C-alpha cells in the first residue's frame, strides 16, 4: 500500500475523501451546499458520497465537533472513508489533511495512516475468494513546511500498523494451525524479517529452567509447550531493558474446570497477549527504535486428557512458591508468573509489563474498549497513560490494595490460583504481583479489548491488535509536547 503527501489542495484522483467538521468551515463549496441543505452536516459517523465532474467520486466523512474529536474518532473517520472507497472500488485516492484539537501534525498524520492501513485489513486467507484492497492514498492540503516530518511519521505509523496487523493475524489464526510450536515459528519468522533475535526453548529446556507452574498448564495437550524469548537491542550503550510478557494460551478449554461451549468458541484468542508483544517487537525493530526490549511468551494449550492437571493439585513455580490449583481455567496466571520470574532473573529486565487475556471479570467491569490495569508503580502507570494519549487506546487502573491479598492466600499452599467471584481482575493481577519482586510492573488485562465480536470500520470481527500501538509508544517514550490528546 502506498501512502504519500503532496503539495496539492485538489488533484485528479479517482476519488477524494473529505474529512469534515460539523462546526468548522470546510473551505469547499460542495460541502457548504450539502451542509446548507442538511444532506451532510459533518456529524460524527456520517458518510456521504457523490460523483463529480473533475473527480470520479467525492466521499465526505463527518468528524463531529472540533472540541469533541478524540484520536480514535479521527482514526475511525478515516477508516469509514476508506471502507466507502473500497465499496466504490476506488484505487487512487486523496484525503485532506485536517487540524485536530490537541494533536500535532505528526499525530494527525499517524492517525490518518493507521486509519487507512487498518481499515484495509482482512483475515480471509481461508476463503476461496479473497478480495484484497490496497489503494494508493495521497494526503493533500497539509502544511508544506512539515512534509519531511509527515513522511517520517507515515513510515513510522505504517510499521506500527504492520505490528498491529501481525497481532491480529496471530489471534485470528485458529488453534489447529497455531499451537505453541507454530506460534514460536511465527515469532522466529517475524524476528528474521524485522530484525530481532528469537530463542525458543522446548519442553526439556523449560523443565531445566524449573518453570513448574507453566508446565502443569500445558501437560494435558498433545501440542508441547514452548518458551519464546525475543530480544531487541536498539541501544547497546544502555543497560536499560524493558520486559514484555504476553499470555500465550494457544487454546483455553478451561481444562477439567471446563468452559461452557459458548465461552470456549473464541478461545483461540487466548494468546492475544503473546500476539501483542510479538507485534510490538516487530514495530520497534522495523522503526529501529533506540531502546532495549525483551519479550517472553510461555506458550501452551490448556487441554483435557488423562495427564492434565486437576482441581486441588498443588504445584510449584520457578520462583519457589507453591500454588493450589482450585480452578484449572485460571491457567493464564500460572503461565505468567513463571514467565515473569524468567524475564526478571534470566533476562535482567528492570521493568515488566505483562499483557494477558486474563479474566472474564474485566469485561464485566470495563467492557470491550478499555483495558484493565493493575500496577505497583504510580510513575510507570503515568507513563502508560502518556503513551495511550499518543494512540487513542484506553486504559483504566484498578486498585491493588492489600485487603485483596487474603482472597488468594492458599489453604494448603503459599497461594491459590483463584480469589473467588469478587474483584476477579484485581486478584488475578495481584497474584502475578507476588512474583514481580521489586520491579516496576504493569499488568494489562486485555480479555475485553483484544477481540471484537461486533467489529467496526477500523477493526473487523476478530483480533483487534490491542494494545500494540500503546506498548510501542510506552517503549519509545518520547513525549511530543504538542500532543495533549
Ligand atoms: N482466558 C480466560 C479469560 C477470558 C475470558 C479471556 C473471556 C477472553 C474472554 C481465562 O483463562 C479464564 O478462564 N479466566 C477465568 C478465571 C476464573 C476461573 C477465576 C474467568 O475469567 O472466568
Ligand atoms: Zn482459562
Ligand atoms: Zn485463559
Image: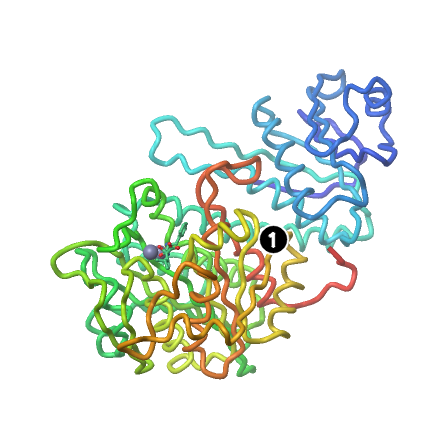
At horizontal 23% and vertical 63% (from top left) the residue drawn is 311
Q: Is residue 35 left or right of residue 197?
A: right
Note whether ligand 1 is within 8 Å of mark 1.
no
User: How many residues crowd around disc 1 within 10 Å: few (fewer than 14), some, or many (20 or more)?
Assistant: many
**Which image quadrant shows ligand 2?**
bottom left
- Residue shown at 66%/37% (left/top)? 78
Q: Residue 436, relative to residue 447: is it above or below?
A: below
Using the rendered view, name the quadrant where residue 305 is placed: bottom left
The foreground one among 216 and 279 is: 216
What is the x, y in percent for residue 355?
A: 46, 62
**Viewer-nearest residue: 289 or 378:** 378
Left or right, 148 with respect to 206, comes to: right
Where residue 121 appears, as percent x and y from the top left, is 50, 39
- Please state the total of marks drawn on the protein image: 1
Check disc 1 and report its element: helix, strand or loop.
loop
- Farthest residue toward the left? 306
In depth, the one of 284 and 387 nearer the eye is 387
Between 227 and 10, the one nearer to me in the picture: 227
Mark 1 = which residue? 393
Relative placement, left or right, of 110 versus 104 is left
Q: Position of residue 329 (x, y in %)?
A: 30, 57
Asked if 210 appears above or below 419 in the picture, the reply is below
Residue 211 point in image, percent of width and height:
28, 75
Q: Classify the position of the C terminus by image quarter.
A: bottom right
Residue at 22 percent of width and 75 percent of height: 207
Task: State the residue at coordinates (27%, 71%).
Answer: 324
Which colour scheme appears in the figure? rainbow
- Side (left or right) of 112 relative to 187: right
Which quadrant is home to the N terminus? Answer: top right
- The image quadrant that residue 325 belongs to is bottom left
Amino acid at each position: 500500500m502506498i501512502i504519500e503527501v503532496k503539495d496539492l489542495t485538489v488533484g485528479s484522483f479517482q476519488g477524494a475523501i473529505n474529512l469534515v467538521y460539523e462546526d468548522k468551515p470546510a473551505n469547499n463549496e460542495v460541502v457548504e451546499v450539502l451542509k446548507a441543505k442538511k444532506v451532510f452536516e459533518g456529524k460524527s459517523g456520517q458518510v456521504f458520497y457523490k460523483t463529480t465532474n473533475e473527480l470520479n467520486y467525492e466521499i465526505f466523512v463527518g468528524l463531529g465537533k472540533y472540541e469533541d474529536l478524540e484520536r480514535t474518532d479521527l482514526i475511525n473517520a478515516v477508516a469509514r472513508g476508506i471502507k466507502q472507497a473500497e465499496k466504490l472500488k476506488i484505487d487512487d485516492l486523496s484525503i485532506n489533511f485536517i487540524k485536530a484539537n490537541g494533536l500535532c501534525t505528526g499525530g494527525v498524520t499517524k492517525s490518518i495512516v493507521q486509519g487507512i492501513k487498518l481499515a484495509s485489513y482482512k483475515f480471509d486467507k481461508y476463503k476461496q475468494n479473497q478480495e484484497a484492497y490496497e489503494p494508493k492514498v495521497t494526503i493533500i492540503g497539509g502544511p508544506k513546511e512539515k512534509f519531511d516530518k509527515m513522511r517520517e511519521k507515515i513510515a513510522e505509523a505504517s510499521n506500527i500498523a504492520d505490528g498491529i496487523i501481525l497481532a491480529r493475524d496471530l489471534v485470528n489464526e485458529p488453534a489447529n494451525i497455531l499451537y505453541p510450536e507454530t506460534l514460536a515459528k511465527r515469532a522466529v519468522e517475524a524476528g528474521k524479517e524485522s530484525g530481532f533475535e528469537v530463542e525458543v526453548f522446548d519442553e526439556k529446556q523449560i523443565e531445566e529452567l524449573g518453570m513448574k507452574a507453566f508446565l502443569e498448564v500445558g501437560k494435558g495437550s498433545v501440542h508441547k509447550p514452548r518458551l519464546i524469548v525475543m530480544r531487541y537491542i536498539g541501544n547497546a550503550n544502555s543497560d536499560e531493558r524493558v520486559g514484555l510478557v504476553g499470555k500465550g494460551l494457544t487454546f483455553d478449554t478451561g481444562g477439567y474446570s471446563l468452559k461452557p461451549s459458548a465461552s470456549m468458541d473464541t478461545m483461540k484468542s487466548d494468546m492475544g497477549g503473546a500476539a501483542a508483544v510479538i507485534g510490538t517487537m516487530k514495530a520497534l525493530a522495523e522503526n529501529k527504535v533506540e531502546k532495549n526490549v525483551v519479550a517472553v511468551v510461555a506458550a501452551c494449550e490448556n487441554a483435557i486428557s488423562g495427564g492434565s492437571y486437576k482441581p486441588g493439585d498443588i504445584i510449584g513455580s520457578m520462583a519457589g512458591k507453591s500454588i493450589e490449583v482450585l480452578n484449572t481455567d485460571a491457567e493464564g496466571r500460572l503461565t505468567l508468573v513463571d514467565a515473569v520470574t524468567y524475564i526478571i532473573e534470566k533476562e535482567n529486565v528492570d521493568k515488566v509489563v505483562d499483557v494477558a487475556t486474563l479474566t472474564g471479570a474485566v469485561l464485566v467491569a470495563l467492557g470491550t474498549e478499555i483495558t484493565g490495569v493493575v500496577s505497583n508503580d504510580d510513575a510507570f502507570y503515568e507513563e502508560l497513560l502518556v503513551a495511550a494519549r499518543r494512540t487513542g487506546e484506553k486504559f483504566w487502573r484498578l486498585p491493588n490494595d492489600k485487603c485483596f491479598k487474603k482472597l488468594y492466600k492458599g489453604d494448603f499452599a503459599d497461594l491459590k490460583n483463584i480469589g473467588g467471584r469478587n474483584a476477579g481482575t484485581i486478584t488475578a493481577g495481584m497474584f502475578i504481583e507476588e512474583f514481580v519482586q521489586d520491579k516496576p510492573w504493569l499488568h494489562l488485562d486485555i480479555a475485553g479489548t483484544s477481540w471484537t465480536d461486533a467489529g467496526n470500520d477500523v477493526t473487523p470481527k476478530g483480533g483487534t491488535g490491542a494494545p500494540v500501538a500503546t506498548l510501542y509508544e510506552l517503549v519509545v517514550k518520547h513525549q511530543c509536547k504538542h500532543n495533549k490528546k
